[in-house]
Image: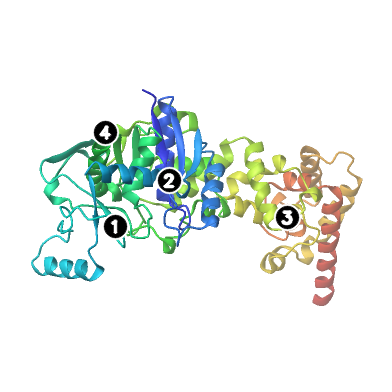
C-alpha cells in the first residue's frame, strides 16, 4: 500500500499556523513512508472563498518547501462528481430528500434544548420517499443502530453510538455539497490512506466513516492533532502576534526555523530540539504526537531563528535577507555582498528584519545618527586621534580586516589611549550608532570611500562642537 496523505485548507482567510502544522505533519508522514502528499483546496464556501486566500496558501507552501505530488485540486471543479454520488446514494435508498422548513427545524431545536436534549434532526422526512423536486436538501440515512469505532492515531480507540448521530445533510437546497459529503468523496477518489487534521474534526469522523461504508469505500486511518494555543492559554489569534505563515516571512523568520518550531508543537523525539528537514522526515511518527494542547511561544521561535541564521549557509540566509532589503527599497548593488554581511550580523539579530534594519548603513549614502551616541562619543577630545586615523586610512593600501585593525591599533598606541576610546567614536562616525559588528569588519564591509566620507563628516561635527565650546 502506498501511503497517501493530504492537506485540505479552506481558502476563506490566511493560512493559520495550525493549518501549517497539519500540512507539515501530513507532508512528513508521507515522506517518512515514501508516500505521496496531495494538496486539495476546499473551496465549496463560495461566498467566503477568495483567490487571494488560495494564492496565500500556495505561496506559503512554496516558501516553506512543502512540495506536493498531486494538486492543487479544487472542490468547485468536482461538482459533477458530487452530484453523481448523491444520485447514486439516493437511488440505493441510502439518502433521502428532506423538505423541512427552517421554521420547523428551529422549533425542533428549541424544543430539544428546552427538554435538555442534544439538538439533532428527528428524521421527519426519512421514510417519506419524497421526490427530488422543488426546494429540498439531500440527507444521508445514517445507521440507527450499532457503534461506530475507529482507532485514532493520537487519541486512541473512539466509539460512538449511531443513535447519537442524526442524518447529516449531503447536498444543500442550492445544490452545493456540504463539507462532510465532499471530503469523503475526495478522500475516496484521491485514495487517501491517512487523514491527519485538527481535533476539531473528531466529531465529524464517525459520520464520515458511515458514509465511507455506505459507498463501500476504504476507510482511511485518522489522526487528529490537538489545537495550538497562545502563551496565555487562549486560542491562538491575531492579538498574540503573527498567525499567518506569510506574516512570519514578513517578520524575518527563516522557513527552516518555522518548520523546526512547528514540528515540536505537539510532537517529540526524545529531548532533541534542533532538527534538519531530513531529520524530521527520518524521525517523524504519529505515535509520538501528544494529546495535550500546545502553546505557541514566540521567544522560542526567535531563538530557533537566530540559531538557523548562524548555522544555515550564508548563501541561504543571504537569499532570504535579500527579500527584506528589496521590500525596504534598498539598492544592494551599492554595498557589500550579503553573503559576507550575514556572518557578521547573524548572532547579533533575532530576525532577518532586525538584520536588515541594523545593516542599512552598509548600503545607503546617508545615515541616521543616534544623537545620544553622537553626544557621548563624538567629543572634541577624540578630534586629534580621529584626524590622524583619517589620514592613515587614506594612505592604507590594503583595505582588509587585519590591515584596518592594525591601523586602528597603531593610532591608539600613538596617542596612548585605550582601543575603545578610538574604536567607539569611529563606530558612531561611520554607522551612526554605538552598535555594529567588530570595527575592523565594519570598515572592511563599508569600503574605503564610504568610510572616509563619513569619517570626514564626523570630524566636521566635532570641529563645530569644539568651536562652540570655546
Compared to 466, does 201 lie above or below? above
Q: Nearer the viewer, mark 1 or mark 4?
A: 1
Label 4 to label 2, Cα distance in Å?
20 Å
Label 1 to label 2, Cα distance in Å?
17 Å
Which circle's residue, 3 or 1, is located before the other in the chain? Answer: 1
Q: Nearer the viewer, residue 349 or 422?
A: 349
* Residue beneath disc 2: 80
- Picture residue at 68% right of the left edge, 47% below the top: 322
Q: Secondary structure at mark 4?
A: loop
Which circle's residue, 2 or 3, is located before the other in the chain? Answer: 2
Task: Tell me, yes or no, whether the two marked residues, 1 and 4, touch with CB atoms within 8 Å.
Answer: no
Within 10 Å of disc 2 (Cα), the crowding (few <14, some 14-19, many 20+) is: few
Label 3 to label 4, Cα distance in Å?
74 Å
Label 2 to label 3, Cα distance in Å?
69 Å
Q: Nearer the viewer, residue 458 or 338?
A: 338
Q: Nearer the viewer, mark 2 or mark 3?
A: 2
Q: Nearer the viewer, mark 3 or mark 4?
A: 4
Q: Nearer the viewer, mark 3 or mark 1?
A: 1
Q: Nearer the viewer, residue 328 or 285?
A: 285
Q: Secondary structure at mark 1?
A: strand
Residue 308 position in % (x across, y down)? 54, 40
Which circle's residue, 3 or 4, is located before the other in the chain? Answer: 4
Query: Can you tell which mark lies on residue 137?
Result: 1
Residue 302 position in % (x across, y down)? 49, 49
Amino acid at each position: 500500500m502506498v501511503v497517501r496523505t493530504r492537506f485540505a485548507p479552506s481558502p476563506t482567510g490566511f493560512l493559520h499556523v495550525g493549518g501549517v502544522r497539519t500540512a507539515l505533519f501530513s507532508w512528513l508522514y508521507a515522506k517518512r513512508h515514501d508516500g505521496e502528499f496531495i494538496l486539495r483546496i476546499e473551496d465549496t464556501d463560495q461566498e467566503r472563498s477568495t483567490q487571494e486566500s488560495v494564492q496565500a496558501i500556495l505561496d506559503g507552501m512554496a516558501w516553506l518547501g512543502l512540495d506536493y505530488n498531486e494538486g492543487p485540486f479544487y472542490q468547485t471543479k468536482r461538482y459533477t462528481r458530487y452530484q453523481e454520488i448523491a444520485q447514486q446514494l439516493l437511488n440505493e435508498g441510502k439518502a433521502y430528500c428532506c423538505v423541512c422548513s427552517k421554521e420547523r427545524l428551529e422549533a425542533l431545536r428549541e424544543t430539544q434544548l428546552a427538554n435538555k436534549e442534544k439538538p439533532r434532526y428527528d428524521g421527519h422526512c426519512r421514510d417519506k420517499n419524497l421526490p427530488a423536486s422543488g426546494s429540498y436538501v439531500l440527507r444521508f440515512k445514517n445507521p440507527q443502530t450499532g457503534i461506530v469505532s475507529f482507532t485514532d492515531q493520537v487519541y486512541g480507540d473512539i466509539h460512538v453510538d449511531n443513535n447519537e448521530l442524526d442524518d447529516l445533510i449531503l447536498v444543500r437546497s442550492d445544490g452545493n455539497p456540504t463539507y462532510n459529503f465532499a471530503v469523503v468523496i475526495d478522500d475516496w477518489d484521491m485514495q487517501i490512506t491517512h487523514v491527519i487534521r485538527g481535533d476539531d474534526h473528531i466529531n465529524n469522523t464517525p459520520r464520515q466513516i458511515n458514509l465511507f461504508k455506505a459507498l463501500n469505500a476504504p476507510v482511511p486511518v485518522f489522526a487528529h492533532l490537538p489545537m495550538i494555543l497562545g502563551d496565555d492559554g487562549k486560542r491562538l489569534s491575531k492579538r498574540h502576534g503573527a498567525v499567518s505563515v506569510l506574516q512570519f516571512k514578513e517578520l524575518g523568520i527563516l522557513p527552516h526555523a518555522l518548520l523546526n518550531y512547528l514540528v515540536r508543537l505537539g510532537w517529540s523525539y526524545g529531548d532533541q530540539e534542533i532538527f534538519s528537514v531530513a531529520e524530521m522526515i527520518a524521525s517523524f511518527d504519529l505515535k509520538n504526537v501528544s494529546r495535550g494542547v500546545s502553546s505557541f511561544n514566540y521567544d522560542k521561535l526567535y531563538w530557533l531563528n537566530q540559531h538557523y541564521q548562524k548555522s544555515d549557509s550564508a548563501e541561504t540566509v543571504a537569499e532570504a535577507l535579500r527579500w527584506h532589503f528589496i521590500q525596504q527599497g534598498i539598492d544592494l548593488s551599492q554595498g557589500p555582498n550579503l553573503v559576507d554581511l550575514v556572518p557578521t550580523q547573524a548572532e547579533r539579530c533575532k530576525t532577518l528584519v532586525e538584520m536588515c534594519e541594523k545593516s542599512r548603513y552598509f548600503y545607503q549614502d546617508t545615515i541616521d545618527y543616534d544623537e545620544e551616541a553622537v553626544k557621548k562619543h563624538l567629543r572634541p577630545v577624540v578630534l586629534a586621534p580621529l584626524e590622524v586615523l583619517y589620514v592613515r586610512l587614506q594612505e592604507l593600501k590594503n583595505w582588509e580586516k587585519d590591515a584596518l585593525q592594525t591601523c586602528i591599533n597603531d593610532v591608539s598606541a600613538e596617542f596612548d589611549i585605550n582601543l575603545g576610546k578610538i574604536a567607539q567614536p569611529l563606530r558612531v562616525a561611520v554607522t551612526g550608532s554605538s552598535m555594529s559588528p567588530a570595527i575592523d569588519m565594519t570598515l572592511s564591509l563599508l569600503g574605503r570611500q564610504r568610510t572616509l566620507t563619513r569619517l570626514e563628516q564626523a570630524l566636521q561635527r566635532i570641529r563645530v562642537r569644539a568651536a562652540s565650546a570655546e
